[in-house]
Image: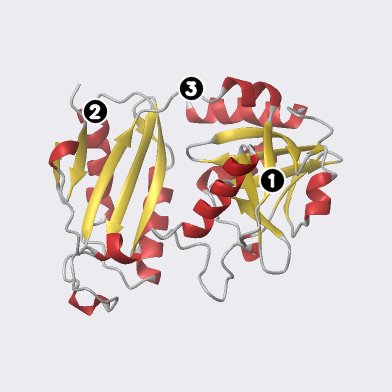
Amino acid sequence: MEEFCWFNGNLIPVGEARISVLDHGLLYGDGVFEGMRVYQARTFRLREHLIRLQQSAQALKLTTPYPLDVLTQACEALIAANKMDSGYIRLVVTRGEGFLGLDPKNCDTPNVFILYRGLKMGDAAIQQHGAKLITASVRRTPLDVLDPKIKTLNYINNILAKMEANQAGADDALMLNHSGQVAEASAANLFIVKHDVLATPPCEAGALQGITRDAVMELAIRLNIAVEEKPMTLYDVYNADEAFLTGSGAELIPVSQVDGRQLKHAVGPMFLKLKQAFYEMTHA
């Protein structure tokens, strides 16, 4: 079946989409994006994603030429065109075509496109036995350099962290901030459980305010699970009863060990309870 994307206001075959080599999104990573999950032909928390995209663009003084209602309709049209029941869509806004040189003043027209990707079932072995993590040597970008709430196209720190994990034979890597506190994984938020209390690093530590992260915290409150945002070190992670990662693409992934240290539960009871609740939330 032919695959479609939404490109600057039109649904077109993916193979026909063209971006200039002078687009500053390509040359300098100058742009923003959102990755979103589709369940039962509906985008999960679409409005929250679009608001975050709009806020990221505003922080970069990047004009989004389409209002939220048009982008909402675009996502719906893309889902219908690709006959999606479940999958992943990515909405990207670039600064647009300009001159060589990083000054954006000559970039007149941003490019906006939305891509679709079908998702394979999650790694059954990881869901059964838990993911193995390492701590990356590359640090999370400091808040006084770039606010983590801005989802830019420049993910080089995260890519380097993922490469370290690959090299070490691990499934993913934790990233620390410049104070040595745990921020997040390469492309996911981190939760730990200790004495029946669920905790996640605060955004001030360098964590992205993830949409799935927020959903899990809401579910914890509904289930009368104590939940808190708090700064944490590797010591806290090593001594956790449980740990898991969350993200739009990843959903919920259990963690079995970190830096060779086995956690008490590879796939713990709180993880299983929240995973089931998240499934019910996304398939209601």
Q: Earlier in the sequence, mark 3 or mark 1?
A: 3
In the picture shown, does residue 171 fall above or below 34?
above
C-alpha separation, residue under disc 1 versus residue under disc 2: 37 Å
Answer whether residue 16 is visible to the viewer in this image.
yes
Question: Gap between marks 3 and 2, in whole Å?
Answer: 18 Å
Q: Residues within 10 Å of mark 1 (few under 14, many from 20)?
A: many
- Which image quadrant: the N terminus? top left
Q: Amino acid at mark 1?
A: Ile
Residue 134 bears which disc, if any? 1
Q: Nearer the viewer, residue 85 or 170?
A: 170
**Residue 283 higher or lower than 216, as above or below:** above
Q: Which residue has dot 3 on it? A: 121
Secondary structure found at label 3? loop
Q: Is residue 218 visible?
A: no
Left or right, 218 with reference to 239:
left
Q: In terms of secondary structure, where does tag 1 sit? A: strand
Task: Give me the disc on residue 109.
Answer: none
Viewer-side residue, 160 vs 9: 160
**Mark 3 or mark 1, which is nearer to you?**
1
| Residue position for label 2 | 82
Residue at the spot 68% in from the left edge and 55% down from the top edge: 201
